[in-house]
Image (spheres, rainbow, N blue to C red):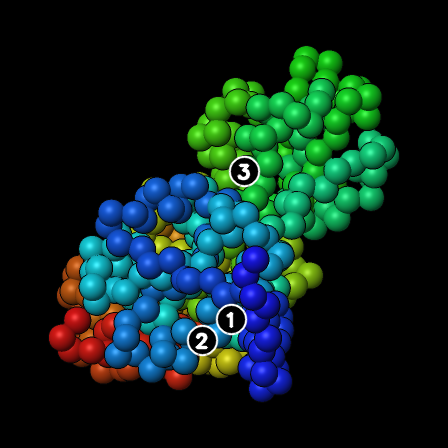
Amino acid sequence: MNPAVFLSLPDLRCSLLLLVTWIFTPVTTEITSLDTENIDDILNNADVALVNFYADWCRFSQMLHPIFEEASNVIKEEYPNENQVVFARVDCDQHSDIAQRYRISKYPTLKLFRNGMMMKREYRGQRSVKALADYIRQQKSDPVQELHDLAEITTLDRSKRNIIGYFAQKDSEEYRVFERVASILHDDCAFLAAFGTVSKPERYSGDNIIYKPPGHSAPDIVYLGSMTNFDGTYNWIQDKCVPLVREITFENGEELTEEGLPFLILFHMKEDTESLEIFQNEVARQLISEKGTINFLHADCDKFRHPLLHIQKTPADCPVIAIDSFRHMYVFGDFRDVLIPGKLKQFVSDLHSGKLHREFHHGPDPTDIAPGQEVQDVASSPPESSFQKLAPSEYRYTLLRDRDEL
């Protein structure tokens, strides 16, 4: 028999202290470092991944590191499965190819991924442990509201875009595709679903998805594609949820500005839906080919008084159409002129050709002067961009354009 071992009192106290410390010390997690070898595998297998694109020399990145790590620890306790939520980071100096792939233009940039797909909206909220943790909890919440009675549809908020799915059962490939699309586009549309006997009256031809546009007069639109085809379902719903003419607010202004495209903006009073509808129709009719070269937006005249003052207008002058090129602002003529075929398209074409800028500085182009009319060089200065002020701030990010070597 081995002789008993007795610890002295100081040794016993030390052992107990170590044991208590080991038991009560919270589990810490390593932030996953991404590189060209592992990035696709890690992101594709993660339900939700929040990726910090950073540079070691950036002071804002340095400030975020401990906050990001602590938020990861908090969330790991709530979602212990390694693929439920992943906090990861990319050293953009070491992996510039990854930074270019995801078009990183500032540090730090926090991008959200779902099953490997990058979400359009990056995280732009407060940089605190609580805010980051709350953001992830929100992303993990169910993006689809279940309907328990079809009568609930009559109480929907019709100011929103609503997507409703009717399914025989929840455990089906059709619903899994629908739920996946909802997790990506839930910021743009409200997603609802009914199952089994509740949905049966709407499943006369099988499972289906309908889109209910804003307002009470527009008819429902039915999805006619394959409900098990993710790409087809996603593209159809995205087309319905993300309008051609988007509203700009102070909340999404930074995001829209960072897209880098000039703004064609209708300033209108909130209750003036008629002018907005006219603008939307003419943009769709005249400018659909310009999608991708300019952002079509509308703004509340009361909220955006300052940009209006920049172009010597007030809310009393609304509706007003203007272009903000991020250098200058240019005003369209009388609003009703949008109904003249090709007039709005010519306004945008004149921006791209540089004609708007030239005419502000030197008066009408010679080609626009009637024969025999004297040409006068009229010097003027167009108002400076107003919406450029909504761009990412140098007090919050290190902007890459500020570094000559980059």
Crowding at mark 1 (Cα within 10 Å: few <14, some 14-19, many 20+) = some
The residue type indicated by label 1 comes to Glu
Q: Residue furthest top?
A: 205
The residue type indicated by label 3 comes to Val
Disc 1: which residue: 70
Instruction: Report x, y in % for residue 347.
Output: 34, 57
Camera-side residue of 135 and 341 = 135
Is mark 1 in CB contact (under 8 Å) with mark 2?
yes
Crowding at mark 3 (Cα within 10 Å: few <14, some 14-19, many 20+) = many
Above-or-below relation of 389 to 118: below
Q: Quadrant of the C terminus?
A: bottom left
Instruction: Report x, y in % for residue 114.
Output: 47, 46
Instruction: Report x, y in % for residue 296.
Output: 44, 55
Task: Indicate which disc, 2 or 3, sits on the residue closer to the N terminus.
Answer: 2
Task: Indicate which disc, 1 or 3, sits on the residue closer to the N terminus.
Answer: 1
Disc 2: which residue: 66
Camera-side residue of 405 and 238 = 405
Distance between mark 1 and mark 2 Cα atoms = 6 Å
Instruction: Report x, y in % for residue 138.
Output: 62, 56
| Tag in front: 1 or 3 | 1
- In which image quadrant can residue 122 be found? bottom left
SS category of the residue bearing label 3: helix
Crowding at mark 2 (Cα within 10 Å: few <14, some 14-19, many 20+) = few
> At x 39% / y 53%, what residue is drawn?
344
> At x 54% / y 61%, what residue is drawn?
2
Above-or-below relation of 364 to 307: above
Disc 3: which residue: 181
SS category of the residue bearing label 2: helix
SS category of the residue bearing label 1: helix
